Every structure is written in structure tokens, then in C-alpha cells.
Amino acid sequence: MAMRTASPWWLSLVLGVGLAFVFLGERLFAHESGARGILTMLGIVIVIGVTGVRAWTTFGSVGARRKVERTLLACHLGTLLGLFLYALTTTFATQKLAMSETGTAHWLGAVTVLYAVVLFASIVPVLMIELSLGQALRTNFQIGALAGDDAGVEYYRVREIGWSGLTVALASAFLMVTCQVASKRNIQRDVSYFKTATPGDSTQKIAAASADPIKVLLFFPDPNEVRDQVRDYFEALAKASGGKLAIETHDRFFDAELAGKYKVTKDGVIVLVKNMGDKDKEKSQTIEIDTEIEKARKGAGKLRNFDREVNSQLMKLVREKRKAYVMTGHGEINDPESVPVDLKGRTPERRTTVFKKRLGELNYEVKDLGLIDLAKDVPDDATVVILLAPTLALQPAEWDALDRYLTRGGRLMVALDPKGEPSMGSLEGKLGLKFNPGDLTDDQAFLPQRGTPADRRFAITTQFSAHASTTALSRSVDKGLVLIDAGALEDVPFANPAAAPTKTITIRSMESSFLDYNNNFTFDAGIEKRQRWNVGAAVEGPKLKDKDGKDKDGFRALVFSDVDLFADALVSSGMGRASVVLVSGPLLDDSIRWLGGEEVFSGEVVSEDDKPITHTKTQDAKWFTLTIVGGPLLVLVLGLVGTWARRRRTKPSEVKP
């Protein structure tokens, strides 16, 4: 009788080597078509070859040894089936199937889970059986073969180990299926302090307004929690945009060619592409974010302000960059070097870093407009001109240049300050407004700062009109705006009543406020008056005719009596962190959009930054009472009720005589 032996242990090792070649070809060298093809084909040939050898040893064995070999052969065949299913997920196979984009996505999801389950259920039992057999049992196989019997074969032990391996594999496979279903039927309920920003109204409007399709390419490792939150954000944005956005998730190693095209060299990169594939029209913008959730959501991480980041990048895709000219040379807060030495002590030093940064995020190029340039005329490429609290009076020629600019349909924003120059020159009659430099004070609705009467100059207002420049401000959660050392606007007759523009008061103070003319921070009934003072106004000129005789919008102007609305403010949050912000919040965004004729994009930009905790004097008194008196009183009441209930349960029964 011919001698037959069991298969050597290294057959399973060769199977592992073949699978390793397939992995290297399909993952690490996916971007190199030549190396990928060689490694993948070599791995498949090795797996097929070792399966053939396993089949030969199976049919050459007898008794219990054949049962062991047959079990291992079934695992090898399962491995081949798993590789075949994987082949059905490749780009070549999906293109041949010619399914829709949605159908392809569902197909890839289902088959990916299926091939992973089959491979895991085939490889794990092989590993456990080989570890169980070891060299000792294989030696017994040889001895049993020489003796012509099966005494040395512990088939039952091998079978139980194989079933255990299959159980472990199927349990893990169940987790894969669960994760796949959870990702497709994802419902999140975040009740923590931090929540990733959701698409705001403004961002949704920008995405929906895009005339061309936009693709969102996410380059993240798999799995990754930051990627999941970012994808949820873009899926909500895609739904709100009416299908203008399409989302793709990529691995930068597997899709190395695509990553190289958009210069993606690390994980955590989001690429927004408009007109993808069109060489002449394609435009892209990149957002980088940390892939560690704790870093991405704290400090300088971008998850808190993710909606603002996306809003800015989408704006750059939807339209070309515009120019905002900010006037200099008159001691403005954006040009402190031009303040005369004798006036530096009178005017507080303020900065406009956040203001300029936000203009850039709105896709505006910020340029200075000095005396020499303005004396000639406002540049033709100016989308908007901004004047922030001049300390020195403008020359009549400069006011005339601004007047001519508005006459031909220009856009102007002016913010003044009681400690600066109050005159608006010839624009007072054109806009029907003048500035009252009295100090706006409120002894009832104000923001406590140092506990002194000077805090009353931090007046709080919630009086906003229904205008495009205050859309997000009027919809904000707290609906409060802090006015710091503000003045007031007063109506004056229009210089040309026959062609009078439309004037809307957008922001007013509270009815309890007054203009403090004697600087004593106290209301004096004889000389001062409590009323709603005008703080912001929007003026829109009549329609004009273009070169073709068609109607076009007239000028637009915004005037504010508080320049601190657009100055840097250092605020501390309830978490002990400090940050530099604009006190006016979303006011700047909507103001610039209205001036630029983009009020369709007005709306809230969601941010999860810590907000400063602000209360009025009355609110502080209520909180003090609740914490000092109400808290202990509540504890006392609960204690008495608990004691009464416990005594009632443990009351002794009456003793009979």
C-alpha cells in the first residue's frame, strides 16, 4: 500500500503569504498600476496553488486524517470565494455592472461586508486548527500513516477547535454587519456640552445657489470618529442643497492618484471641488482638520467652527473674490498710527483683526483707501467702501468722492464713535442721517463688567428690525447685542427730496436708555431723555439705468453709531478660556452681504464656540437670589420630606395592654 502523509504546516503559511501579497497590491500599491497588478496576481496565484496542493493531500489521505484535511480545504475554498467577492467591488467590476450611483453605493456596501465576513470565517479557523495541531500532532499523523491506521489523529479535537474559530469569526462578522447597518441608518443624539456644528442657514443657501455641482472628497482613515461627524455634516448639507453636493470618502493610500491631484499628503483633508473633471472650469478649496476627536473639538480645533469654515470655502467656489476698500489716514480704528499724538489719549486704542479676517472669509480682498486715492475718486473695482470712526475730519473732496461713488450705485458702510469725528459731511443730506455724539447709557439693561457706574455704557439691546442686514442677529439664540460707548443717529431732511432713498432703522436701543450729556452715568430728567435711540440704519437709493438702459439697483449704505460693534473684543467663556471676537456676532456677515447684493446668503452661521455668559443687572439679582437662597431652601425642603416619609414607614405599631 502506498504511503500517504498529512499536509505540512507550511501550506497554511504560504496561504497567508499569498493573502499578504494581495493586501499589499490592493492597499499600499493601489496607486501604482504596474506594482498593483503584479502583487495582486502573484498573491492570487499563490492562493490558488496552495489550495490545489491542499486538495491533493485531502484526496491522498484516509480516515480521520482526510477529515482534517477536508476541513482545511473548505477553509481554503472559502478564502478563494472571499477574494472573488472582493473582485466584484473593484472599479472594473462596478463599471461593468453599469449601475446607478446610488445602486453602486448600496452594492459596494453589501458586498464589502460579505467578502469581509467570508474571509474572516475562512482564515480564523485555519489559524486555530494549525495552532491546535502543532508539530507534535503532525508527527503522530506520520506515525499513524506508517502503522496504517488513524490512531494518532485527534480529529475530534481539531473539529472542536475549527468550530470555535468559526464561532469567533462569525461573531466578529456580526459586528461588521452591525457597523454597516448603523452607518447607513445613523441617528445621533449628542447631549454633551460640545456638539459639532450643523449646516447653518447661510451655508445651505450658498450650496443651493451654486450653478454647478460640487463634490466633497473626504480623505480620512477608516474607521475615524472625526470623519463620521464631518460626513454627517455634509450629508445634511447635501440634503438641504437639493442635490448640489455629492460626497465621496477616500483613502489617500488606496486612491493615491486622486490624492496627488489635489495635493493631499495627510489624513484629515476635505477637498471641495466644483465642476470636477472639467479642466477649464474646475475649482477646488481645501479644509484640513485633526483626525483625533479630542484635538478636533477643543482649543483651535475646527469642529466647533466647522460650519463657518465650510461657509467660507463654499463662498470662494460660488463666486470670484471681491474687493473691500477700508479707508485710512484719518485716525480710524483700523489705522491707529494715523491718530495725532495730541488725540491718542482721548480715543481708546482698538484693533480690527477679526473684522479683516472675517472679510477675507467672506471672499473679499481687503485694501486700504487713503487720502490721495480717495481725493481722485473711489476705485472702479470697489465692491464696498468702509469707514470706521475717523478721529480727523475728512476733507470736502473726500466726502464728494464718496457722494459720487454712491450716485453711481456704490456700497458704503460707516461706523462712528462719540470720541471721534461726528460729521458725515455732504453724506448727511444724501442719507438723511446725522450722528449725535452723546454717550448712550442704560442703567437698567447693561452688561456688568467692574461693578461701577461705568458699566452702564455697556448697554444691551434686543431691538432689531426685519432687514436683510440683521437677519441672523434677530434670529440668534440670545437675541442680545452689547453696545459699547455708542452714540445715536438722528434723522435730517434729504438733500434731494424728489429722489429720496429708502431708509430703514435696523437697530435701536432699549427704551430705558438715554444719552448722557454730562458724563455722570446717571439719568438727569431735566436735560436727558429715555427713549429708543437709533443705532443702525440702512439706506437704499432709487433704481438706476445701466449702459443698456436697463434698471439696476441704486446705492446701498449702512450707518452705525457704535464702531465697537466691529472692533476686537476679548471675552472669557464659562469654561475659563479667552478668545477675541466681534461683539456684534453675525451682524458683519449680513451687513457685507446686503451691501454686496448677496442678501440671499444671509442667515446664521453655526458656531459651537463658548459664548460669554452675560446677564443684565436684574438677571444677576435673580441668579444671586436663586443660588444663595433658593438652593439651600430646596435642599431643606427635600430633607424634611424625606425624613417625614421615612418616619411614617417605620412608625411602631400600638402596644396592646
Image (cartoon, grey):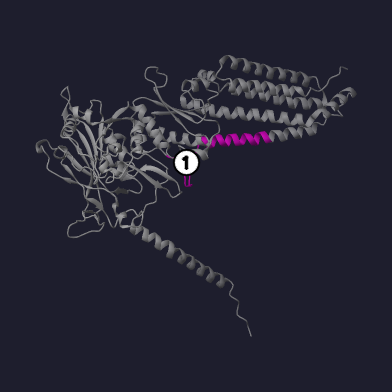
Q: Position of residue 323 (x, y in %)?
A: 29, 28
Picture quadrant where residue 414 is located: top left
- Compared to 216, does 339 lie above or below? below
- Compared to 204, does 149 lie above or below? above
- Residue at which label 1 appears: 299
Counting every numbered tag in the picture gives 1
Q: Quadrant of the C terminus?
A: bottom right
At x 79%, y 22%, the residue is 8
At x 41%, y 62%, the residue is 626
- Compared to 479, does 411 lie above or below? above
| Magenta stretch in the rendered image | 168-197
Picture quadrant where residue 199 is located: top left
Q: Position of residue 609 (x, y in %)?
A: 42, 43
The residue sitting at the left extreme is 498
Q: Amino acid at mark 1?
A: Gly
Picture quadrant where residue 350 is located: top left
Q: Position of residue 507 (x, y in %)?
A: 25, 46
Q: Is residue 184 visible?
A: no
The residue sitting at the right extreme is 147
At x 76%, y 22%, the residue is 10
